Image (cartoon, rainbow, N blue to C red):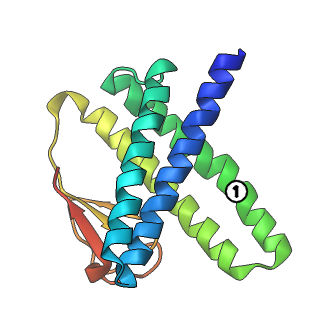
Amino acid sequence: MDKIKEALNQAFVGEAKAALRLKVYAQKAEQEGYTQMARLFRVIAFSEEIHGARALRILKEIKSTEENLAASFESEMKVAEVAYDQFVKIAEEAGDRLALLQFSQSKDVEETHAKLYKQAMADFMEERETTYYVCNVCGYVADGILPDECPVCGARKEQFVGFEQ
């Protein structure tokens, strides 16, 4: 990998991490009643997303929707089968129950993401419309039906957020 490509990859990863971190900080500030600080965190997170998106475009990582679906499917499978399997083993060996729970649930959710991508690839030409529901606790995504309870972490349906668009 040449130096520019490596630098662009590092920039993307850094910006993506910063954007997520700032969104979480915004949620915390909002919970604590700091509306203006929450707004600042969200604005800067949006700015960081712009930086990351620019790096992706320069890297030519954004392809056709069909290619993006296939790449996303492969990525989710790799994360679930390789990365999270290793993370689970590390947490088990360390006896860290909280990390083990997070890694185990995330692995299950990543596998669900892969299934959703696979279904989307199958439905690609017909553009099936659905509402997705995301568990605010573990990130599980339900396709079309709001579950009474999250199948991964057991959260109640009130903990889900609907996405129609």
Looking at the image, residue 123 sits to the left or right of residue 24; the answer is left
Identify which amino acid the numbered label 1 is placed on.
Asp
Q: Residue furthest top?
A: 2
Residue 111 in view (yes/no)? no
Looking at the image, residue 159 sits to the left or right of residue 112; the answer is left
The quadrant holding residue 48 is top left
Residue 21 in view (yes/no)? yes
Residue 81 picture location, percent across and down: 64, 49
Q: Residue at x 42, y 61 (%)?
A: 23
The quadrant holding residue 164 is bottom left
Residue 82 picture location, percent across and down: 69, 47
Q: Residue under circle 1?
A: 85
- Between 147 and 5, the one lying in front of the other is 5
Q: Residue at x 70, y 56 (%)?
A: 85
- Between 118 and 43, the one lying in front of the other is 43
Looking at the image, residue 101 sits to the left or right of residue 44; the answer is right
The quadrant holding residue 10 is top right
- Between 44 and 152, the one lying in front of the other is 44
Question: SS class of the residue under badge 1?
Answer: helix
The answer to whether 71 is drawn above or below residue 24 in the figure is above
**How many labels were placed on the picture?**
1
The answer to whether 124 is drawn above or below residue 44 in the figure is above
Q: Residue furthest front?
A: 36
Q: Residue at x 34, y 80 (%)?
A: 149
Q: Residue at x 53, y 52 (%)?
A: 18
